[in-house]
Image: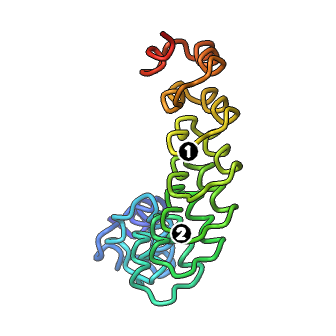
Amino acid sequence: MTNKDLIKQYVNTGGGIPRYQYDKLPNWAKKTYLRRIEIGLDNKPANLQYYYGEITEEIQLRVDGSKIRYIDNPSEKLQLIAVNQIGSAIQYINNPSEKVQLTAVNNFGSAIEYINNPSEKVKLAAVSNYAAAIQYINNPSEKIKFAAVNQNGASLVWIENPSEKLQLLAVNRSRYAIDHIENPTEKLKQLHKELWGWGSSLIKKQMK
């Protein structure tokens, strides 16, 4: 295979090649090849074996964000790379900025489990992305509760003493929400029947 063929088949597609073939490439093509491999690591982390340049901390984190635990005083840039890939990597970051926290929960709402004293903004982002994240929030505000239920009505299961307004929203959002309401009112039962028919396990008993 000629250098020209190698460039066409691998360099321009981001595919990995053995080291002996890489060594045949001209310098400019090597740079292009390495850049394309690096860009593709998010989707093809196994291609790290075909990366023949310097494997920096940043490149390592592109493959496995949890490795940030082994880096002393990582820059915010590295922190963002890590939590973009694995939200739970935030547990290995000391005093993450709100920007890092928001990046983590916007990608993985459950990452809020590992954030101490998150702001209302971070809480809201977490439940808006993943309603079940509300189970990791102590004493959520009404705004947080409504955001979670609006995202998934069944998240009512993690909310104590929900207001009737919140219950109504939950039933509107999920046929299963009423299963998590103790002694639903006739108004809730009727709404559920109009929206979902008999489509939940407990409502059949409750409607009798």
Q: Answer above or below: position of 203 versus 178.
A: above
Q: 110 or 24: nearer the eye? A: 110
Sort mark 2 into few (<14), some (14-19) or many (20+) by Cα contacts within 10 Å. many
The residue most toward the bottom is 72
Q: Residue at x 66, y 29 (%)?
A: 168
Which secondary structure lies at badge 2?
loop
Dot 1 amino acid type: Ile
Residue 37, quarter of picture: bottom left
Residue 173, quarter of picture: top right
The location of residue 110, given as percent across then percent down, is 49, 56
Q: What label does residue 159 carry, if any? A: 1
Q: Earlier in the sequence, mark 2 or mark 1?
A: 2
The residue most toward the front is 183
Which secondary structure lies at badge 1?
loop
Q: Residue at x 50, y 40 (%)?
A: 157
Q: Which residue is mark 2?
A: 115
Residue 166, quarter of picture: top right
Sort mark 1 into few (<14), some (14-19) or many (20+) by Cα contacts within 10 Å. some
Q: Answer above or below: position of 121 versus 48.
A: above
Q: Residue at x 56, y 29 (%)?
A: 174
94 left or right of 122 in image: left
The location of residue 12, given as percent across then percent down, is 49, 62
- Quadrant of image for the N terminus: bottom left
The location of residue 170, given as percent across then percent down, is 61, 32
Q: Answer above or below: position of 93 versus 114.
A: below
The location of residue 142, given as percent across then percent down, is 69, 48
Dot 2 amino acid type: Ile
